[in-house]
Amino acid sequence: MNVFITGASSGLGAALAAHYAGRGARLGLVARRETELAEVARGLSGEPATYLADVADARAMHDAAQDFMRRFGVPDIVIANAGVSVGTLTEHPEDLAAFERLMRTNVIGLAATFQPFVAPMREAGRGRLVGIASVAGMRGIPGAGAYSASKSAAITYLESLRIELRPSGVKVVTVCPGYVATPMTAVNKYRMPFILPADVAARRIARVIDAGRGYAVVPWQMALVARAMKLLPNPIYDRLFKRAGRKPRGLKL
């Protein structure tokens, strides 16, 4: 099994890499942080291929994909996991850079990750393209407008891609995790219901991928929360969330 994972230097990406390494997969791991990526790779069996790249850099992702396929062949699974999160407020002009960064990584990065693999996987008539979105994409979360918008866009993009590739044999899987214990959530100072350790989340996400499900929320409890959030009328949603905990602004992306 050939598996290509972005955002593999920590958190959920590293946990997914460990999970698939344990299943004997040949891995391609992408991240921006060289030292952390090398450390993750050293802890895995099978000598994974590592690529230092920003997922929003289409040329770098194309080169990484081509090298991976030369070495191992067409992937069975591509997991676009790389993502960034930071609190944002539109009234602050300095937050516009954070808006742009989140959109480039969390949305453009999805397309740049998948694009080099679509034609080879379509030709092979198999494979899974997996996008890690978020429950935060279901509705606008106050103080996290850029993150919510990016994950909402990711969900919609993945739905479009799923339909485009439906006749080809290539499955597109949208995964919307709730809270996962990673460096991204460690800065949150508010209660995070149903939070999962990264290794547990990775195993559950792998089951969704194995099943080829088009869409899933992990864990299942957050699926109920997400459904309720979508059904709430605006006035009630606004009242409930106006005092919700907010992610800190100004974090390094």
Image (tube, grey):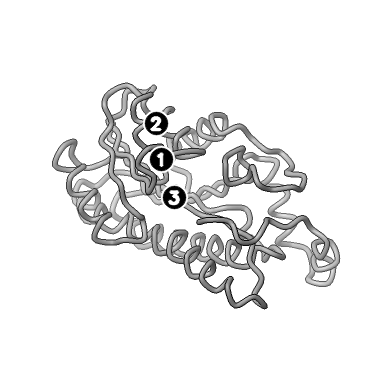
Is 35 located above or below residue 217 in the figure?
above
Tell me the quarter of the picture where residue 23 sits. Answer: top left
Left or right, residue 26 beside residue 183: left
Residue at image location 52% in from the left, 47% down from the top:
175
Name which residue type carries label 2.
Val
Looking at this view, is 150 or 57 the one in front? 57
Q: Earlier in the sequence, mark 1 or mark 2?
A: 1
- The residue labelled by disc 3 is 82
Is 183 located above or below residue 163 in the figure?
above
Q: Secondary structure at mark 3?
A: loop
Residue at image location 23% in from the left, 49% down from the top:
65
Asked if marks 1 and 3 touch (Cβ < 8 Å), the reply is: no
Q: Position of residue 134 (x, y in %)?
A: 57, 52
Disc 2 to disc 3, C-alpha distance: 15 Å
Tell me the quarter of the picture where residue 88 sits. Answer: bottom right
Q: Position of residue 108 (x, y in %)?
A: 40, 64
Name which residue type carries label 3.
Ala
Q: Secondary structure at mark 2?
A: helix
Looking at this view, is 205 or 189 the one in front? 189
Badge 3 crowding class, 10 Å Cα cut-off, few under 14, some 14 to 19, many 20 or more, is many
Q: Position of residue 246 (x, y in %)?
A: 72, 57
Left or right, residue 152 beside residue 163: right
Q: Secondary structure at mark 1?
A: loop
Asked if marks 1 and 2 touch (Cβ < 8 Å), the reply is: yes
Badge 2 crowding class, 10 Å Cα cut-off, few under 14, some 14 to 19, many 20 or more, is many
Q: Earlier in the sequence, mark 2 or mark 3?
A: 2
- The residue labelled by disc 2 is 40
